[in-house]
Image: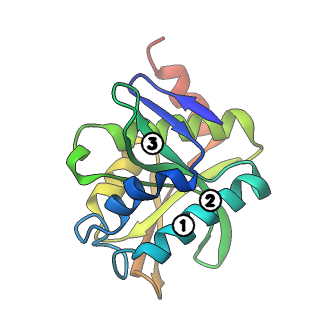
Amino acid sequence: MIIETERLKLRDFSFDDFDSLFEILSDEETMEHYPKPFDEEKVRGWIQWNIENYARYGFGLWAVVLKKTGEVIGDCGITIQNIDGEFLPEIGYHIHKKYWRQGYGSEAAKAVRDWVFENTKYDCLYSYMKYTNIGSYSTALANGMKKVKEYPDEKNMISSAYAITRKEWKALKEGEPK
């Protein structure tokens, strides 16, 4: 599985990606909106969970790789998440903090959004995050999503959910320059 954008490749994770992913998911600043940064066991579990998702659903979070260098700079993909009591397709992402504010998260998320609407039957995609996570909701907005709800959440205290429908995506794609 490979999705390509102008600057990125998204591909399946393997355990060979452990060191790169550990550097990202164990970082306190990157994981500020999670209960705590991931330890080695949690990162191994994260990779295993995604490998299982690839087998079960045909998708998961993919490694975000810089085309120019081959460096893994994060993850982005689609998983099935519990969003306010419903299990829904969710675009998630983590980008190494040294690459923040360079458009990589938005570039990867848009590619995943397009892949999902082109390759699945989902009529709506979501992204959810802790209500204080400005980077994540900025990426959701850049992905054409709109805020659809806020709700109490045991993990985040309050979560915000953003969504884009297939119809909204089609209109967005028609308006993009060719």
Q: Residues within 10 Å of mark 3 (few under 14, many from 20)?
A: many
Is 84 drawn above or below residue 139 in the view shown? below
Counting from the top left corner in percent of width and height, residue 167 is at: 64, 37
What kind of element bears circle 3?
strand
The residue that label 3 is drawn on is 64
Counting from the top left corner in percent of width and height, residue 99 is at: 25, 44
Q: Residue at x 43, y 37 (%)?
A: 65
Single out the residue that lies furthest toward the bottom. Answer: 154
Instruction: Tell me whether the residue at label 2 lies in contact with that at label 1, contact meaning CB atoms closer than 8 angstroms.
Output: yes
Quadrant (top left, top right, bottom left, bottom right) of the N terminus: top right
The residue that label 1 is drawn on is 46
Depth check: 105 or 96 in front? 96
Single out the residue that lies furthest toward the top. Answer: 178
Depth check: 146 or 117 in front? 117
User: Gap in Å between the C-alphas at discs 2 and 3?
Assistant: 13 Å
Instruction: Say which quarter of the image contains residue 27.
Output: bottom left
Instruction: Tell me whether the residue at label 3 lies in contact with that at label 1, contact meaning CB atoms closer than 8 angstroms.
Output: no
Q: Please indicate, yes or no, whether residue 80 appears anywhere in the rendered image.
A: no
What kind of element bears circle 1?
helix
Counting from the top left corner in percent of width and height, residue 134 is at: 27, 60
Earlier residue among tags 3 and 1: 1
Q: Residue at x 32, y 51 (%)?
A: 138
The residue that label 2 is drawn on is 50
